[in-house]
Image (cartoon, rainbow, N blue to C red):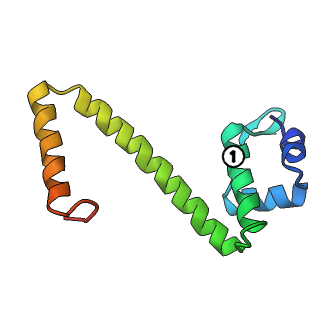
Amino acid sequence: MDDLEFRLCLKIDVVQLDLWIEQGWLIPEMSNEGRQFHDADVARARLILDLMGDMGVNEAGVDVVMDLVDQLHGLRATMERLMTAIGRQERDVQRRLFESLEDIDRFGTAGRMP
């Protein structure tokens, strides 16, 4: 959707949208017709509206939240690639990897850096 459709959908003005883009909270795709937004951008914008509106989070807080959301999505993509790579291994290798993960969980070291 274009800039106008995006702003109408969210009921925001161009100044607000420009600020969000300037902050790096939204990164529209650029085309010959101007800025283009996708469903993921709408979801991010709604989160920003909720944070700044109902939840009373300031700009610095929104910056932290959006950074964490981006990190979470990055980790999720990494996990999907890892699971695909594991799925391509021989069954014995898969079994050993999953057993190793179970051992890590059992000894309470999950989530800690080595």
Q: Position of residue 112 (x, y in %)?
A: 25, 65
| Total tally of numbered discs in the picture | 1
Residue 64, by quadrant, is: bottom right
* 34 in relation to 87, above or below: below
Q: Is residue 27 visible?
A: no
Q: Nearer the viewer, residue 16 or 107?
A: 107
Q: Nearer the viewer, residue 28 or 44?
A: 44
The residue carrying pointer 1 sits among few (fewer than 14), some (14 to 19) or many (20 or more) residues within 10 Å by Cα, namely few
Q: Residue at x 17, y 49 (%)?
A: 102
Q: Nearer the viewer, residue 67 or 11?
A: 11
Residue 4, by quadrant, is: top right
Q: Is residue 69 left or right of residue 85?
A: right
Q: Position of residue 107 (x, y in %)?
A: 14, 61
Please name the amino acid that badge 1 sits on. Answer: Ala
Q: Residue at x 72, y 59 (%)?
A: 48
What residue does disc 1 label? 43
Q: Is residue 59 left or right of residue 75?
A: right
Q: Residue furthest front?
A: 106
Q: Residue at x 17, y 41 (%)?
A: 98
Q: Locate the N terminus and report the quarter of the image it occupies.
A: top right
Q: Locate the C terminus and report the quarter of the image it occupies.
A: bottom left
Q: Residue at x 74, y 52 (%)?
A: 46
Q: Is residue 90 visible?
A: yes
Q: Position of residue 100 (x, y in %)?
A: 13, 47
Q: Secondary structure at mark 1?
A: helix
* 70 in relation to 30, above or below: below
